[in-house]
Amino acid sequence: MPREKGRKVVASNKKARHDYAILDTYEAGMALTGTEVKSLRAGRASLVDAFAQERNGELYLHGMHIPEYTQGTWTNHEPRRTRKLLLKRLEIDRLIGKTREGGLTMVPLQVYFSDGWAKVEIALAKGKKSYDKRQDLAKRDADREIARVAGRRGKGMDE
């Protein structure tokens, strides 16, 4: 069977962009079992409350929920188990250094298949304060209003 091409998104963490200021992103592989991959291919995963953390010089993904595979037997996986992230040593060292240095955290943004391999997009992020979130919402609303007015002008429907 030929390997699939392109990028197929399985799950995304929309709340992460609302709660965190994204500074940098990295693509990481995941150490998964067979039933986890089958469950991901079925499009079942959740990144709510997931985060990455360093342990013994390696990165692990905590809190990601991959439900049990329905056709799985006794070999099924535990849905919220800790999964090892696969990155190059230089990237791991850089991420660990930046998280120890300042108030930064590692948050997963997306889980997807890239050319048949399960990947996770990890972001180096800084938590937003509530007033930052309000400013972002106000800016988004203002941009939306400007685009709406510009669209009406372009169609010749001046107010």
Image (tube, rainbow, N blue to C red):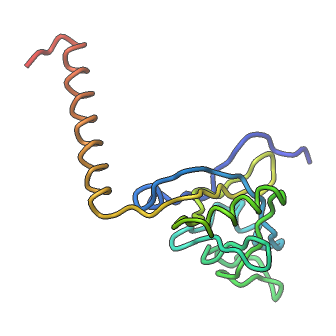
On the picture, is 30 further left or further right than 46? right
Q: Is residue 117 left or right of residue 52?
A: right
Q: Quadrant of residue 71?
A: bottom right
In this view, the residue farthest toward the bottom is 74
Name the spot of residue 111 as percent of width and height, x first.
65, 58
Instruction: Locate residue 129, reporting x and y percent.
Output: 34, 64
**Residue 3 drawn above or below residue 76:** above
Which residue is at the far left? 159
- Tell me the residue at 24%/42% (across/down): 141
Which quadrant would residue 101 be assigned to in this image? bottom right
- In this orientation, which residue lies closer to the viewer: 92 or 109? 92
Quadrant for the C terminus in the image: top left
Q: Is residue 69 left or right of residue 126?
A: right
Q: What residue appears at the point 68 percent right and 64 percent down from the top-left corner?
A: 97
Side (left or right) of 152 relative to 47: left
| Outermost residue, right side | 1
Pick the front one: 72 or 107: 107
**Residue 154 location, x and y as percent?**
25, 13
Viewer-proximal residue among 31 and 87 = 87
